[in-house]
Image (cartoon, rainbow, N blue to C red):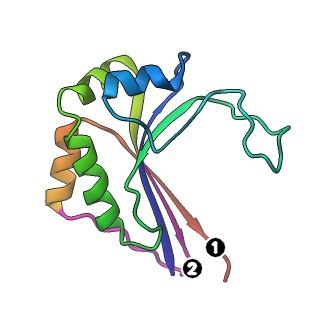
Amino acid sequence: MTEHHVYFAVFGFDEPPQAISLLAGITPDDSWCAGDAYSSLLPEVRRLDSRWILSSNLDQHASHRDHFERLILKLERLGDRLPALRERYRCGIGVSQYFFMDDPAFYLPADLLARVQALGLSLSFDQLALDS
């Protein structure tokens, strides 16, 4: 079993997340500010940085290709607002893959990589092996 999370994040900003939403022309799927409580279960644990996140909104068990296609489509629809975000903020695409096997493979076809490259965004990968 493999779980995937693919998201676009704007991070390290000082203004309220609503300022990024205004520039992007879209509301985030999630956002928080540095100093916010991480969860209601552990209110003393605080977030270390601010984030504004768009995700694929697919089930975590969907394929990484499906996650990428959905997220890239959302980002392409931002049009000229995406370069404005890149110019003003630190941002990129993050991928987290949780897997239960010894040799995880991660393949993205050339057409998807070309679309990511056209957006001018960096990709960061985290692959985490979980004990079964």
Q: Residue at x 18, y 33 (%)?
A: 79
Residue 102 colored magenta? yes
Which residue is disc 1 drawn over? Answer: 130
Judging depth in this view, the residue of 119 and 59 nearest the camera is 59
Q: Position of residue 30 (x, y in %)?
A: 52, 42
Q: Where, quadrant-wise, is the C terminus in this rendering?
A: bottom right
Residue 81 placed where, x, y %? 24, 26
Q: Secondary structure at mark 1?
A: loop
Indicate whether 87 appears above or below 2: above
Name the quadrant containing residue 47.
top right
Mark 1 vs mark 2, CA separation in Å:
5 Å
**In terms of secondary structure, what is the magenta stretch mainly?**
loop
Closer-to-camera residue (41/112): 41
Q: Is residue 74 left or right of residue 28?
A: left
Tally of marks: 2
Which residue is at 44% across, 19% downward? 19
Who is closer to the viewer here, 123 or 12? 12
Which residue corresponds to the image point at 22% horizontal and 50% vertical from the top-left?
Answer: 73
The residue under label 2 is 100
Measured as percent of width and height from the top left, residue 117 is found at 20, 43
Callout 2 amino acid? Phe
Q: Amino acid at mark 1?
A: Leu
Instruction: Tell me if residue 66 comes above or below residue 73 in the rendering.
Output: below
Mark 1 touching mark 2, by CB under 8 A? yes
Q: Is residue 131 left or right of residue 104?
A: right
Sequence-wise, the earlier of marks 1 and 2 is 2
x 54%, y 25%: residue: 12
Mark 1 Cα-neighbour bin, 10 Å: few <14, some 14–19, many ≥20: few
Residue 26 screen position, x and y as percent: 34, 34
The disc placed on residue 18 is: none
Query: For residue 109, what is the image quadrant?
Result: bottom left
**Residue segment shown in magenta:** 94-109
